[in-house]
Image (cartoon, rainbow, N blue to C red):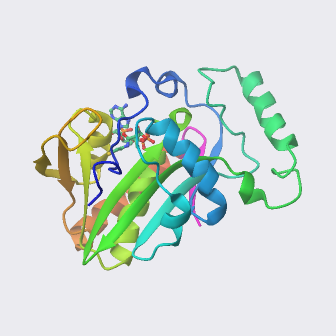
């Protein structure tokens, strides 16, 4: 279970409804890759965590987290060669997006450059999942403001559930701020239900945490439901030009 400092649910950077990404249209092709984090991701992850949970202290030591056994750090990155979204972009014309894409492609080390392309892939989101005696715990999850409402959070939750099942865990559990309706809606979609609460769990403002848990993710019925959600997710986003792959 995460400490008060390290909960998945530190105070978030913004109200999702006022987030520019929420108002933006969804035109533009993107290829998101779900993969395990590696040491070369740590700088990006540290910066991303700071932008998503600005009041979180101390920050996560991702170098250590990635190396630890009994847990997994998953990331979703935008594959090299695809136009990377500018985090300050609110909306843009097709021409602006094409120009952004060309600039990205022209950078050394990205799709047209040489060297390790994966180093340059911008990370759109991450999750840290702990496996403890048959139970998995989502210790943290977050998506960059510019990539929200594009299916990245769902892909991370799918990845966390798959990782839990692969590590012989029956259920996943997590804490979420009582006020965090966006995250709760995401978890409910994947079968998490509120099973309890922790009063004053978050030290920055004393907000309560809700404890949410899945049913048995290795149960056939749940596995079928997950497969259906994954298919719907892929189909829905393909329709607006986003593709999701797993490493
Ligand atoms: C919560 C969070 C991870 C969701 O990521 P995301 O990539 O925007 O989510 P998706 O686009 O995959 O959306 C999946 C589902 O989440 C829910 N959801 C996401 N954003 C929402 C919003 N602003 N309002 C209501 N529901 C929302 C919906 O159920 C959505 O399904 P739908 O598109 O069929 O309605 C993201 O908003 C985030 O990083 N927030 C800040 C950090 C945080 O709160 N982390 C969770 C701590 S417990």
Left or right relative to 77: residue 184: left
Left or right relative to 43: residue 148: left
Quarter that holds the N terminus: bottom left
Q: Is residue 239 magenta?
A: yes
Q: Inspect this view and state whether residue 231 appears.
A: no
Residue at the spot x=18%, y=63% of the render? 215
- Split into quadrants, the picture shows ligand 1 in the one at top left
Most distant residue in the front direction: 58
Magenta stretch in the rendered image: 238-247
Residue at the spot x=50%, y=44% of the render? 49
Percent x, y of residue 38: 61, 65
Q: Nearer the viewer, residue 159 or 67?
A: 67
Q: Nearer the viewer, residue 175 or 94?
A: 175
How many marks overall?
Answer: 0
Residue at the spot x=87%, y=41% of the render? 106
Q: Nearer the viewer, residue 136 or 153?
A: 136
Q: Is residue 88 magenta?
A: no
Quarter that holds the C terminus: bottom right
Vertically, is 137 above or below 122? below
Left or right relative to 113: residue 135: left
Can you tell which quarter of the image residue 30 is in? top right
Left or right relative to 101: residue 11: left
Percent x, y of residue 162: 39, 68
Percent x, y of residue 64: 51, 66
Q: Inspect this view and state whether residue 143 appears.
A: yes
Percent x, y of residue 128: 42, 59
């Amino acid at each position: 279970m995460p400490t008060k400092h390290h909960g998945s649910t530190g105070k978030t950077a913004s109200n999702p409804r006022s987030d520019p990404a929420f108002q933006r249209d969804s035109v533009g092709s993107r290829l998101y890759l779900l993969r395990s984090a590696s040491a070369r991701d740590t700088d990006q992850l540290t910066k991303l965590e700071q932008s998503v949970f600005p009041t979180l202290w101390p920050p996560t030591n991702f170098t250590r987290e990635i190396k630890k056994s009994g847990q997994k750090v998953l990331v979703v990155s935008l594959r090299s060669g695809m136009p990377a979204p500018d985090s300050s972009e609110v909306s843009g014309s097709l021409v602006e997006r094409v120009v952004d894409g060309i600039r990205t492609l022209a950078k050394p080390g990205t799709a047209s450059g040489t060297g390790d392309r994966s180093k340059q892939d911008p990370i759109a989101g991450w999750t840290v999942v702990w496996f403890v005696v048959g139970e998995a715990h989502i210790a943290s999850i977050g998506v960059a403001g510019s990539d929200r409402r594009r299916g990245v959070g769902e892909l991370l939750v799918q990845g966390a559930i798959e990782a839990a099942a692969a590590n012989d865990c029956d259920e996943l559990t997590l804490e979420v701020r009582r006020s965090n309706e966006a995250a709760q809606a995401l978890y409910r979609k994947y079968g998490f239900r509120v099973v309890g609460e922790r009063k004053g769990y978050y030290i920055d403002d004393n907000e309560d945490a809700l404890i949410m848990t899945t049913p048995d993710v290795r149960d056939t019925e749940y596995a079928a439901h997950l497969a259906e959600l994954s298919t719907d997710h892929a189909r829905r986003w393909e329709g607006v030009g986003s593709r999701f792959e797993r490493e």
